[in-house]
Image: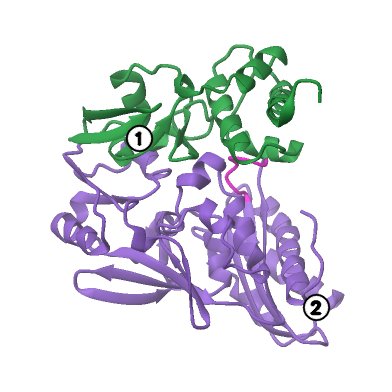
Chain colours: A green, B purple
């Protein structure tokens, strides 16, 4: 069957198999391999993408359900503030959770540029990280929010 | 996987047409957060998927007279952030907010949570305490059934293979009424609930319990009403002695229900604490007073 969707600002019209999931479509058909598959059951959040403005697990959306939707993957995140803050705070270790973490952070900061620590922890509560212990990720998101609110020296 | 076709109807009528055509060869998919896992594990093997997530008439919350009516396609995120649901319904919002993770809440729907009939379905527990009524629709017509009569066994419900659950409705709580919810999980997010309770309470000025409905999750084959404790508490003045007797009744009832399982002792004792928290939350809301910390 054929579906139309917009991924990272680009329109696609693609032939897909019925059994394909959104993550398979992104990785195998569009070669956007920044989106990772961890558990395949919606527990780990490594496959997180933004679908019509909200984060979803791309392993728990069928590709045909993404018809006419707008998807943002890690490849489409142009926000340098979040990426730089993650690097500066040491929030990236093995890196497997990072694409999902950054999309969860982006989704939060798109709506709220002044999140509390609790807001941040809630926003990434669907994303597992086995390396950092989360504190560095939380600091990075705090820092990204500060940069967004006006400058590095806040 | 044996999938041959997937449909995305835009109206309920269209969806019912597909369902009438394919019946047990098909499965309805909405958010997909449970169904896709079952599909990939081979627990279900439909030839056809009917996606109802594009049907706008099945989404959202409506106030109809003294009832609140929730569309089956309403996501947990939409429910948790719905401004129509007032403070007295905090227990329903708390339950919606406690499900899965932000990603799951953005996709998962209330109708899916009911139809999957998991023993641990968190949103079902407060809906049971609200004595909700479900509307099931097929090409042949509509029928209504109380949620408390809908579950038949673990994962089994009363729905026919040509029917769609379309709405869930309950009476909007008014003065002296409140709905509390409390859940015991292993950790905050993505934890399947070990025990959950919801209490709907109407209480008068001298603390006499006019109406109480108690529902539990994860202490039986499916979420269920706790009639024994309801019967004991109805009409009594809520004080320490009454509460202690009620807790004993609950412990004994749940221990007998789970007898033979190695969690029976733990669950029957822990259930008392979880029930008590849900009750106190309902009490605070019924009294129009302050909040209780989790």
Q: Which residues are magenta?
A: B187-194
Q: Residue at x 80, y 78 (%)?
A: B242
Q: Which mark is residue B41?
A: 1
> Where does residue B268 sit, x and y in percent of width and height?
68, 58
Of B187 and A11, the residue lying toward us? A11
Lower sequence index among marks 2 and 1: 1
Q: Residue at x 52, y 55 (%)?
A: B78
Other-residue count near label 1 (Cα within 10 Å), few / some / many at <14 / 14–19 / ≥20: few
**Residue linked to disc 2:** B242
Corner quadrant of residue B254: bottom right
**Residue B259 appears in the picture as rendered:** no
Residue ranking furthest to the left? B21
The image quadrant where one finds the N terminus of chain A is: top left
Asked if residue B212 is positioned above or below residue B198 in the image, the reply reads below
Chain under label 2? B
Q: Assign the magenta stretch its main secondary structure.
A: loop
Q: Residue at x 81, y 21 (%)?
A: A153
Chain under label 1? B
């Amino acid at each position: 069957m054929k579906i139309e969707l917009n991924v990272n600002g680009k329109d696609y019209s693609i032939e897909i198999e019925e059994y394909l999931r959104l993550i398979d479509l992104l990785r195998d058909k569009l070669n956007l391999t920044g989106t990772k598959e961890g558990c395949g059951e919606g527990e780990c959040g490594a496959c997180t993408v933004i679908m019509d403005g909200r984060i979803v697990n791309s392993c728990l959306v069928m590709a045909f359900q993404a018809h006419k939707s707008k998807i943002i993957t890690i490849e489409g995140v142009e926000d340098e503030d979040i990426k730089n803050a993650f690097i500066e705070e040491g929030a990236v270790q093995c890196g497997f959770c990072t694409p999902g973490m950054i999309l969860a952070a982006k989704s939060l900061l798109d709506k709220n540029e002044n999140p509390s620590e609790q807001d941040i922890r809630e926003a990434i509560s669907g994303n597992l990280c086995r390396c950092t212990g989360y504190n560095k990720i939380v600091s990075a998101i705090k820092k990204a929010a500060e940069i967004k609110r006006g400058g590095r020296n806040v | 996987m044996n999938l041959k076709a997937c449909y995305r109807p835009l109206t309920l009528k269209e969806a019912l047409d597909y369902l009438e055509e394919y019946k047990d060869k098909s499965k309805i998919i909405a958010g997909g957060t449970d169904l896709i896992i079952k599909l990939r594990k081979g627990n279900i093997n439909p030839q056809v998927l009917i996606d109802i997530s594009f049907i706008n008439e099945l989404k959202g919350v409506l106030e109809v007279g003294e009832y609140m009516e929730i569309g089956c396609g309403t996501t947990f995120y939409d429910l948790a952030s719905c401004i129509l649901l007032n403070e007295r319904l905090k227990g329903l919002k708390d339950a919606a907010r406690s499900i899965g993770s932000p990603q799951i809440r953005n996709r998962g729907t209330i109708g899916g949570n009911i139809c999957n009939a998991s023993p641990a379905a968190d949103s079902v527990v407060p809906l049971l305490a609200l004595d909700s009524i479900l509307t099931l629709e097929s090409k042949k017509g509509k029928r209504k059934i109380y949620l408390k009569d809908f579950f038949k066994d673990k994962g089994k419900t009363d729905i026919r293979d040509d029917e769609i659950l379309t709405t869930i409705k309950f009476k909007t709580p008014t003065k002296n009424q409140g709905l509390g919810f409390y859940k015991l999980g292993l950790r905050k997010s993505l934890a399947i609930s070990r025990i959950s309770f919801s209490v709907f309470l109407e209480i008068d000025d001298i603390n006499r319990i006019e109406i109480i409905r108690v529902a539990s999750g994860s202490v039986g084959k499916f979420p269920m009403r706790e009639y024994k404790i309801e019967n004991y508490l109805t009409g009594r003045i809520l004080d320490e002695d009454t509460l202690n007797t009620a807790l004993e009744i609950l412990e004994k009832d749940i221990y007998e229900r789970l007898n033979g399982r190695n969690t029976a002792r733990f669950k029957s004792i822990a259930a008392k604490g979880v029930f008590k928290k849900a009750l106190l939350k309902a009490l605070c809301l019924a009294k129009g007073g302050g909040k209780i910390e989790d």
